[in-house]
Amino acid sequence: MSKKLELFKELFADYPNIAILHVDNSLDLVTNTLEQVREKNDGNIKYIKFEDETSAKLRATAREYEYVILGDILSYCPNKDKILKLMYKAIENSGNIIILEKKTNDNLHELLELIENTGFQAVNNIDLFDEYNTITAKKMHHWDNGL
């Protein structure tokens, strides 16, 4: 597992004062790895414990985070598109979203399409963890909804 977490850590570019949002459904799979990224870059992580869709609704200002990580939450949100739009707004231009979803939820294709329809670019599923899909995407300036 430590090798997989090291590979996960490589998804993060080094940004001084990196700002990360982690909305997590008690998964805690990547929490220690995110702390290592934060420490290396002297950054900040805002943790939100997911309880229901309301807890994932942000009051974030536009372009507040370089990375947003959603830890197994979208399958529990009836309004996935609204959550993704909120996250899109919260991400810096050229920032990234990383979504971990249980493979047993069997909703990979639905999520990939929804993420693209939200305006994210370069949407990929990385086969990194045995039990979780690891979906990555980028917010590009002046592409689709790029604010």
Image (cartoon, helix red, strand yellow):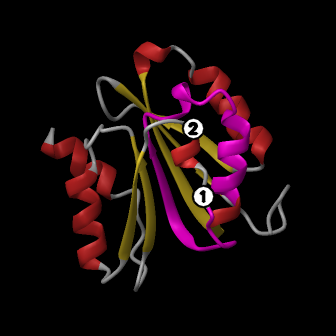
Label 1 secondary element: loop
Give yes or no for residue 14 being in the magenta stretch: no
Residue 45, percent across and down?
37, 68
Going by the image, does 66 lie left or right of 85? left
Q: Quadrant of the C terminus?
A: bottom right
Q: Is residue 31 above or below residue 26?
A: below
Q: Nearer the viewer, residue 54 or 2?
A: 54
Q: Residue at x 70, y 50 (%)?
A: 121
Toward which corner of the image does residue 143 lie, by quadrant?
bottom right
Q: Quadrant of the N terminus?
A: top left
Label 2 secondary element: helix
Q: Nearer the viewer, residue 98 or 78?
A: 78
> Magenta segment range?
59-88
Residue occupied by mark 2: 53
Neighbor class of circle 2 (other Cα within 10 Å; few <14, some 14-19, many 20+) is: some
* Amino acid type at image mark 2: Glu
Residue 86, percent across and down?
68, 54
Q: Residue at x 50, y 62 (%)?
A: 67
Going by the image, does 3 lie left or right of 94? left
Q: Which mark is residue 58?
A: 1
Spatial CA distance of label 2 from label 1 is 10 Å
Neighbor class of circle 1 (other Cα within 10 Å; few <14, some 14-19, many 20+) is: few
* Amino acid type at image mark 1: Leu
Q: Residue at x 30, y 72 (%)?
A: 38
Q: Nearer the viewer, residue 12 or 28?
A: 28
